Amino acid sequence: MSRHVAVLAAAITLVVSACGGTSGGGAAGTSAAAAACTVGVSWNNYQEERWAKWDEPAIKAAIAAGGGKYVSNDAKSSAETQASNVDNLISQGAKALIILAQDGTAIKPAVAKAIQNGVPVIAYDRLIEDPKALYITFDNVLVGKLEAEAVFKAKPTGNYVIIKGNKADANADFLRSGMEQVIGAAVKSGAIKIVGETYTDNWDPPKAQTEMEQFLTANQNKVDAVLSENDGMAGGVIAALTAQGLAGKVPVSGQDGDKAALNRVALGTQTVDVWKDARMLGKSAGEAAIQLCKNSDPSKVTGTAKFTTPGGNSLSSILLTPNPITQANLKDVLDAGWVTKADVCQGVAAGKVAACN
Amino acid sequence: MGASVPSEAGAEGGPARSERSFGATLSSALAPVTGLLRSLEIDTRMLGMVAALAIIWISFNIVSGGTFLSARNLWNLSVQSASIAIMATGMVLVIVSRNIDLSVGSMLGFLGYTMAMVQAVWIPQSLGLGQPYTWIVTLVIGIALGAAIGGLQGFIVAYGGVPSFIVTLGGLLIWRGFIFRYAQGQTIAPVDTTFQMLGGGTVGTRVGALGELPSWTLGVVMCVAIVFLQITSRRRRRRYGFPVRPMWAEVLVGAVTCGIVLGTVWVANSYPLPPNVAEAYAQEHGIPTPPGGLFIPTGVAFPVVIMLVVTLVVTFLATRRRFGRYVYAIGGNPDAAALAGINVRRTLMLTFALMGSLAAISAAVQTARLNAAVTSLGTQNELDVISAAVIGGTSFAGGIGTVPGAILGAVVMQSLRSGMVLLLVDSPTQDIVVGIVLVAAVGLDAVVRRRVS
């Protein structure tokens, strides 16, 4: 009888710890956590490649370097699960939290509760509208600005087409406002004419291709430059340009550091690929968490600045600077080990691009 | 299976009384017209669709200042419609057999990804880049895999007795999930240069279209095939004592069908190669540049050629082969079909396998056209394909639907979409319009059919 109870208890422990889904390896004992700085990370959807491949190792390394301990769980794309996950992390002894929010509004009560209990919160990559949170992300307005700058430098006048991302995604408008900083004056003076501008459902590349075909048709091919907000859509745009024999003659922008897009930069069909190194983001968040363990005031973390949110809150933030990759500095992504030379330089004629030699 | 039958019967109830006088007037006014249609054996639904398409085209043309009906835009439209149209031909048979396939978009994504991996990763890594046979090996692998996974779904539906809605809903999730499994969200690009031709794109001076003379040849061959089919059909009807169309009606139908085919060829040949491509092409082929500038006709694009061949083959299967007639018999009454000795299960499984291989062909077209496989490939295509079939006159009650109708449905859908992009209408508004048109087309058709027949 007593043996059955023991087996049952062991089974329950197993199930509970399995359900906790700690992807950080070893079990998180509350006793051990008290001394060191335990950092809890709440992923919204660990299934996506990026988090496991780039962000998590960088966060782990930064925390380990600061003498801290890493615990995590996964909300599997559910806002409700994430709210209870945040509580779980605190009961596991987390002294600072890094949250990749599934829903920046729905997570607010859980975040407010954590901060009240003296556990500082880092809003990782996505905004959480809480004035006491620390917001760490790449500067999306700047990404848009860098995209436009590279294209503007290549074509300061003429007919522009702007292919924007999903309308429901605030980033689409952040990027567009960054572009406006660069081309706004030229549009006003008439040097640049916007002959086509549209949102694209789900940032879908085939849709972007159809849009570009229609813009080219409507303007009898008189399109001089294309501002595409990301790499996937740039691929669709360039396929449409290729069909008209215009690829490589019309500058096109993009962002994300996709393998295929970096290859297009090397081939000369895409002008710029604004690259956001997820490892920098992870490192920055891990280091900030260690600092927050010692002093829970976000504004005291090194490198922070005030950021006014679309919701009107003012919070501390670290906005990282993305790196615009053109043919001239393709070497950066290779040196960083982001992609292999074989992938980037596929089909590039010998001697044409320095990074491929 | 057949769960949607009661809904149509139910719709007959309510508002009929108040509309009866209107309906009576309408049918008496249309009496000579319906008589004409009867001797032509043309579905009123089909005719309504042609009229709707004409209205859409003409109004877009007026609003866009003549751009919409330019040869270039019509050429674009034909290429943009092709991949949905190819799948819609198979969807007609699936829906006619009282089933549904919700997985086509995900299957397309999965198959497109597989084909991209084969030609951009697996073959180059093991045998080297730029093999001349890469494109055909890729295509054969894709179509075989498509038939296999379509057939697997069909097997579960037919032999396992699981409703097709459930099986293919599962498929929708599973195949999409597999894309993430083996590509981890990466874009696979570029595809083989010969393979790219399947999408109607341009690589250097190679253009994914037939060119002038082969296009006309294709048109003439198709006309001969159409007339031949008409003659054999007439003979067979005589032999079995079935009624035949009056001779004038037969000639008219043949002339109109041929006219559409040759018209398509003429439009495609009126679209010249873009100046940059034309110059390079002329240089390579030693064509001197005339004073008025080059005019090299593009001809019918390969995706459209593929679509025409698929249409011909599936129409033949559906109307002239035992398999197709069984599908319609099963859709009309599954029990009677089984009692008549038809192997219902096998036929159903084959329908799904056919759908899978058509999804593979569409996947090849889309991947080739984009010159890349992306994770969102084929997202929501199932809705476009089902809409095209339904706008094209396929009935969810089973037993009714034609392949040419579905092609027309796909063209209607794509005309709306690309026309609105031309007029700078944003995407949420596009969705609203397409949604309204879908419901209105089927609703209006139901009303008119009740009154006229």
Image: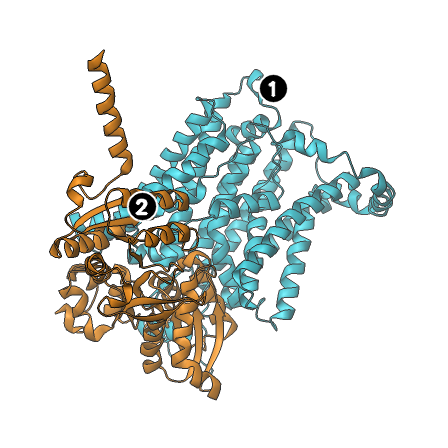
Q: Residue at x 77, y 33 (%)?
A: B13
| Residue A235 percent coordinates (x, y) | 35, 63
Q: Residues within 10 Å of mark 2 (few under 14, many from 20)?
A: some
Query: Does A78 sit above or below residue A18?
Result: below
Mark 2: which secondary structure? helix
Task: Name the image quarter holding the C terminus of chain A.
Answer: bottom left
Q: Residue furthest top?
A: A1
Q: Nearer the viewer, mark 2 or mark 1?
A: 2
Residue named by callout 1? B336
| Residue B44 percent coordinates (x, y) | 71, 44
Query: Does A343 sit above or below residue B114?
Result: below
User: In which quadrant of the rendered view does residue A165 lie?
Assistant: bottom left
Q: Is A89 on the left or on the right of B97, as rendered?
A: left
- The amino acid type of the residue labelled 1 equals Ala
Q: Which chain is orange?
A: A
User: In which quadrant of the rendered view does residue A2 lie?
Assistant: top left
Q: Disc 2 vs disc 1: Cβ atoms closer than 8 Å?
A: no
Q: Residue at x 69, y 50 (%)?
A: B48
Residue named by callout 2? B180
Q: Which chain is cyan?
A: B
Coloring applied to the structure: by chain
Q: Nearer the viewer, residue B239 or B350?
A: B350
Q: Residues within 10 Å of mark 1 (few under 14, many from 20)?
A: few
Determine which of the numbered discs, if any, sits on residue A287 in the image.
none
Task: Name the image quarter holding the N terminus of chain A.
Answer: top left
Q: Nearer the viewer, residue A197 or A63?
A: A63
- The amino acid type of the residue labelled 2 equals Phe
